[in-house]
Amino acid sequence: MKLNTDMQVVKINDYLWEIPPSEKPGMLVPARIYASAAILGAMDRGVFDQVTNVACLPGIHRYALCMPDGHWGYGFPIGGVAAFNPEDGVISPGGVGYDINCGMRLIRTDLSLSEVQPKLELLMTELFRRVPAGVGSRGFVNLSRRDFRDVMRQGAGWCIAKGYGWEEDLERIEERGCLDGADPTHVTDYAVERGINQLGTLGSGNHYLEIQVLSDKGIYDRATAAAMGLTGRDQVVVMVHCGSRGFGHQVASDYLKVFEKAMRRYGISVKDQQLACAPFRSPEGQDYFGAMNCAANTAFANRQVITHQIREAFETVFGESARRLGMQLIYDVAHNIAKVERYRDGEWLVHRKGATRAFGPGSPELPACYRGIGQPVICGGSMETGSYLLVGTDRAMQETFGSTMHGSGRTMSRAQAKRTVRGEQLMRDMKQHGILVKAVSMSGLAEEAGLAYKNISDVVGTVDHAGITKKVAELKPIGNIKG
Amino acid sequence: MPGSFRFLDDIALADMAFDAEGESLPALFEAATHALIESLADPVTITETWRHTVDMEEADIETLLFEWLGRLVYLKDAQGVVFHRATLSLTQNTALTAWHLHAELTGAPVDPATQDLRSDVKGVTKHLYAVTQEGTSWKARVVLDV
């Protein structure tokens, strides 16, 4: 099999491959890639180079991992997972990503396609009006600096206290929507000024708000789906993909500069400047962790405010309360984060960069309603193809630090996608296929065309066969809002 | 002579990258600035109702360009604006230990109804970032995170 690397890649099984430490000077552990043979063969050279760079970082534990949606990223590959000893290992912004706590949220409804279809245009217009998207968009929540510090510390809980959501939402958010250790004193004024007006906004790029339908044949595991309030019968759900916006990016950029200097002080060298890191227990490492948690909590709050706006939009269009419409949160999960997590073999600082937590059944971190089935994992596909809902497994706890894929992964550059398809034409084509699109930017829409992405079903098939997550349901888009 | 820029494929699959070039450092800065402005919105559709002046100083030209482009991204979010034009002047201090950039920016608050908005650039990255001189020509490669 021809791969985009000269390194030796050893087959462990049909869905798992390993690059031994002998393949690159400085590797402390093997690198492991979850992929079918076809997906592995299509992976770009960056994946192999970068996952083996990660394997060289001080304090790394067991493996540097990459998920099947992996592709080149800054520092870590997208799809990268690595755990470090919190006592003598490092923390790296390149292992979290610029969009700190970029993540997915899924909201159920009791509505069916036949009820929504006649009002879809109206609903999309109402959502587009209430959830700002695109360049420089500003949210409706006016925050003072003191308010914003509270958001950084309290995350989604701040929103619930202010009436932007339901108390029971919190138990269905990773870490109840609030990471401990958020310290606004380690956030720069630049970051605050970029983020203070952005609460409740989608952003642009690959972020979206999508109305989706779950058909009967889209359910793979009926009992597990039912435990999440999903019964099929063309049931309508709403998916949100966004993160900490400019605020999180500024935190990451600020600390990459800090870490470049810190590495000299601590005698750390890395294979790639974008892997800049510092010992987790160092002052610099703890300062970044405090600031990163602020950005993560702000992202949880961002998705919570957007949820509030979605519920209000549905109430306006359908003339019923969101509770009567059954608009419970199914789950909210991060895919760009670093957290200290407890496993059977100890406590590790787990970096997930374009990878989703996927805790298995019985995990004490899960709410009672999901402890029997495992954590819901929400994987967004391209806006033309659909998305998947999965659950975490015990195997993920054993093999991947409770982690799995996050999306389909790009295969085409933004520039090439824009040359291949025009936004206006794409919008017309999607409408013909039953998907209504509202977009701020036509060029931005073209960049996100389905042809620019891997087939998500192939990627999901890999993690399902590998056993690190199990398929529950496939969700098909009928309405998409993009920046 | 004005500088030029071109967007690049296959440098950063999920993001945007451009090469900028100029026969002088001011021309290079203007070309790179124009590339970033064009990434955010079509400047032809942006009026000049917002004006802002920036003065920045850095020890070297590579850091100055990086920080300047980052400042534009910051202003986009913090002030909620997109840009029409940037008029730049570059000077080096007499001891040759620092470069100073004076920039006069014009633009307008974001308005999707009247502006051709493009990508919400989140930041400038260090990936492949370089400013180089080849003969009398200056070049920069910039990867933007979107």
Image (spheres, rainbow, N blue to C red):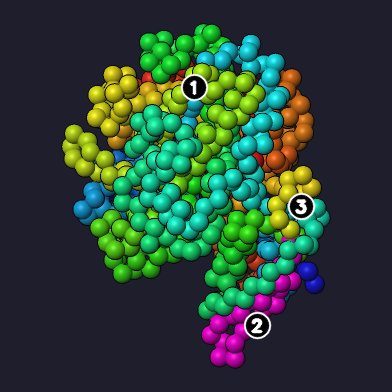
Identity, as a three-letter code, of the amino acid under mark 3: Asp
Q: Is residue A360 above or below residue A189?
A: above
Residue pointed to by mark 3: B42
Is residue A282 visible from the viewing direction of this image? yes
What chain is tagged by disc 2? B
Image spot of residue B24 (x, y percent): 71, 75
Residue sitting at x 62%, y 76% = B55
CA–CA distance between discs 1 and 2?
62 Å
Identity, as a three-letter code, of the amino acid under mark 2: Thr
Residue pointed to by mark 1: A323
Q: Nearer the viewer, residue A151 or A444?
A: A151
Magenta stretch prevailing secondary structure: strand
Q: Which residues are magenta?
A: B86-107
Of circles 1 and 3, the one toward us is 1
Q: Nearer the viewer, residue B102 or B128?
A: B102
Residue sitting at x 80%, y 53% = B45
Disc 1 with disc 3 on a shared chain: no
**Where, by quadrant of the figure, is residue A208 drawn?**
top right
Q: Residues within 10 Å of mark 3 (few under 14, many from 20)?
A: some
Q: Residues within 10 Å of mark 1 (few under 14, many from 20)?
A: few
CA–CA distance between discs 3 and 2?
29 Å
